[in-house]
Image (cartoon, coloured by chain):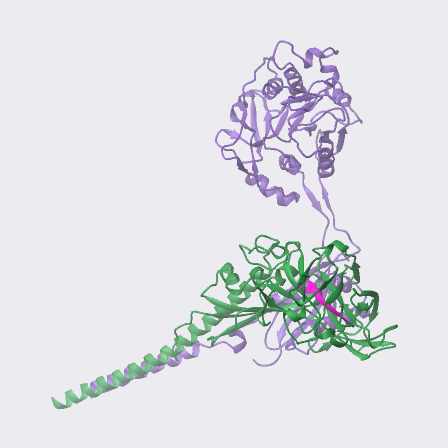
Amino acid sequence: MMRTIEILLVIIILTGAFIISSLFAVLPSPRQVSPLNLPRLALTTLQTLDGDYDLSATVFKANDDPAWAQLQIALSACLPPNMVYNLTVYEVQGGAQLYTVIKSFSNAENLGVSSESASYLVASSNVTFSVTPEKIGEHGSGGTLYILNCSDANGWWITGYTAQSLAQDLYNLLCPYFKNTIMVQNTTQLDQMLNNQSLQGETLQNAVVINTFGECVPIPKVYCKGYERENEGYDSSVTYPYTRYCYTLGQRTCQYNWTWVSIVGYPLYYASNTEAFVNVDNTYGIYGMQKVYQGGINAFLQGLDNQPYRYDDTEVAKPIPGGLVSLSSTVALDCNYYGIYPSPNQTSTRALSTSILSNNLTVALKVFDQVGNQIPGAVYNHIFRNNVNITGSFLALGLTRTPDIRLTALGLLSYYKPRLHPSDYTANGTSRLVVFQLGQAGGV
Amino acid sequence: MAGSTIDHIVALTVFLAALLLFISLFNQTIQTAILYQQHRHLATVCSDLLDNMMLNSGYPLDWGKTNSTPTSFGLQDPEFTQYRLSPFSLMRLQSLTGKPFTYPRTGVTYSNMSIGFGNFLFVPYTKAINYSTAAQLLGITNTYGFNLTITPIVTVSVEETHAANPLTLVVNVAGPGFPLSNAEVSYCFVKVVSNGPQKNPSYTSLFNTTYTNDAGSAVLYIPNVAADNAYAFIAYAHMSGLVGIGYHERVTGSARTQYVLPLIDSFEDRRVLLVHSYNVHDFGPPESSVFFNATFVLLTEDFTLREMPMENSTGKLGKVVYGEGTEKTYQNLTIPTYNPGILIITYHSNNDDGVVLMPWGMSSMAFPVTFGSTASNPEWVVTDIRQVLVNGIAYQAKLLLWSLKGYGVIG
């Protein structure tokens, strides 16, 4: 009898356990079992109605405007018949109360047992939201951008473009970020710059000089053979005598603390002046151009480091094995900030060797990730030993042709990091927030 | 001793019976909860899958404008963000509902997306994306089945209430059971002008704008139309961001049986084959050549219609014959643009005139799309919907999803 009583006790315990677990295991209501994604439906409805900016126009109209009635009709027309909704428009403003109700309407007294909503921010068509960039040099020295646009020189390794078209594109991209942007229209003006003469009253010191001529660099006539500054541009004792001119460029870069920019290919491989070299070609049929060869970049770096001039045509730029290089994480991140989106992968056939760093150079910014001992693209700072001041910088992108000048712009912006100041979206009367709440009629 | 044994037997029997009963009761509770979770999971998958289709262009991005099979499936218009679908990607989906047919001259089978007489869209099976390919590209083969329907939100119906002098047409604009009052309606009226037997017809076109009344209707009076004139009427209705399209054609006499049938031949080359209707539906003699004259209209950004001139080299003028004689049985026509629009083909056959329409880009004539599979005894089907735009036309995308695995739940 005792066993039977024990079993009855067990049954009572199990019954209690079942009842208690059943109380907690509440099954959901039928509409929760297979729900429509109401927030998405609400959002896509608002997006559809704003496809041609009709919604944006309506929510800024007066409360008694017929456009509100039309919006209500459109909402009723585009939603499934079992949907109930409430649409509320808020004015977005500053101050203690951020949102003020402007208008609200529904197609039912209430939204049933449950509802979900989506919000959508619309901007007034009368307001233009702008982004004001900080000017480079605004809070310090420098701030001048020189873009070489010399009409009396030819470019190389910029196949499909002319230096002038690239210069114009660069101007459009970078002009908002610099205090002064100056197109250097001919080699005479380039000569003026090299002699510390301002072209338009701008500050020459700490300027950025972009060479849009690819592997070639414009050379003022005075630096050519037979002219007054021949000794600064021409060295008859070597195979490629205009290597000497690159040394002068390096010296000036150091002297004025310029940032010299080579947009593509092997830097300073040719020199061009269509008047001085009228009968000379670069061995590929481009007249007005002299080959400088591999010694150009070496001479430039010697000049930058204030070393005595010594002809050296050691090869310092080679193709990356496999060719493919990727934007560094810093620069890739800055693509979003500055809204410039070049392809993140490029082909590098003229990546500089790390051996050039022996010229008192440090890598200030890697535009592309380093591959072994080759740097496909970077900004180098020159700092004399036992010194902390930068005395000249050099941006080189050792990519294959044709050039993507957005990479140059991105490299410079990523290096100087000018800030962007967007206009305030919460300013009174500029934005309105539309909250669209959806529920399902009927049932539980 | 005997009493103790009986006690044990009774106790054990009762215990085992109670245990079985409670196992069954607990099992039911657990199974119901599992089933609920599986259904919730299916609803989440449905929402994700729908977003995956709507917010992804697929690869290549412009696969809708090529003849190639994409390596990734998505319907978003690559030129836009958000829920905007490509009218050409939609055009390349194999229709689930239309009855396919084979054109005997080329042996090509076509997916039929047409909506009644005169509103044709035929896409070759070889260039249309079928359900199994899409399921494979979406990674749901043998796991989930789906059915995607994309239907226009706004219905624009056109009714002829008076045949001639003046021709009277009533345009009704409505959402699902709700008329759109004060909607702007821009329309294009194309009248076929016969140039005599065995000659290509010409046409006159009229473009204008009107508004619907409180009941969502607009009454249009078109002058200079006789009862024996064939015509096509296309209307775009626009209100508060909602855009819908309606159309109506009138053909005369035997032009309803002997007409031009447009068959898409190549998306990449924008090439359309124009064939004789008898190659598809043989209504018996008499049979005659059909002379045609085609044109193309676009919907502009301000929601008005504009005719896009076609060069003679596109093949806009010609004739098609039924027989297999020395004459070509069909003609090639090249659509002049990748902008969505409507190909209007006016034709003359057996002294009667007619006109047929074909959308270039699914949205141009607000054709619905039904793509996927039909559920066969599924345990549970979930649904999710989105409002989308297809070249500015408001559509509703609805996805039905079911599991192909089953859950192995008893009871």
What is the letter of the green chain?
A: B
Query: Where the C terminus of chain A falls, by quadrant?
Result: bottom right
What is the letter of the purple chain?
A: A
Residue B236 % position (x, y): 76, 67
Q: Nearer the viewer, residue A98 or B274?
A: B274
Q: Is residue B407 left or right of A367 when viewed as pictured?
A: left
Q: Is residue A23 left or right of A358 when viewed as pictured?
A: left
**Above/below status of B132 relative to A202:** below
**Above/below status of A443 relative to B335:** below
Residue extending furthest top?
A237
**Residue B7: quarter of image:** bottom left
State the count of labels.
Answer: 0
Residue extending furthest left?
B1
**Residue A94: quarter of image:** bottom right
Image point (62%, 24%), residue name: A389
Q: Which of A277 and A48 is in front in this view?
A: A277
- Would residue A434 be visible to someone looking at this image? no
In magenta segment, residue B357: yes
Image point (67%, 17%), residue name: A245
Image point (15%, 87%), residue name: B5
- Would residue B58 be visible to someone looking at this image? yes
In magenta segment, residue A203: no
Magenta extent: B353-364
Residue B244 % position (x, y): 73, 69
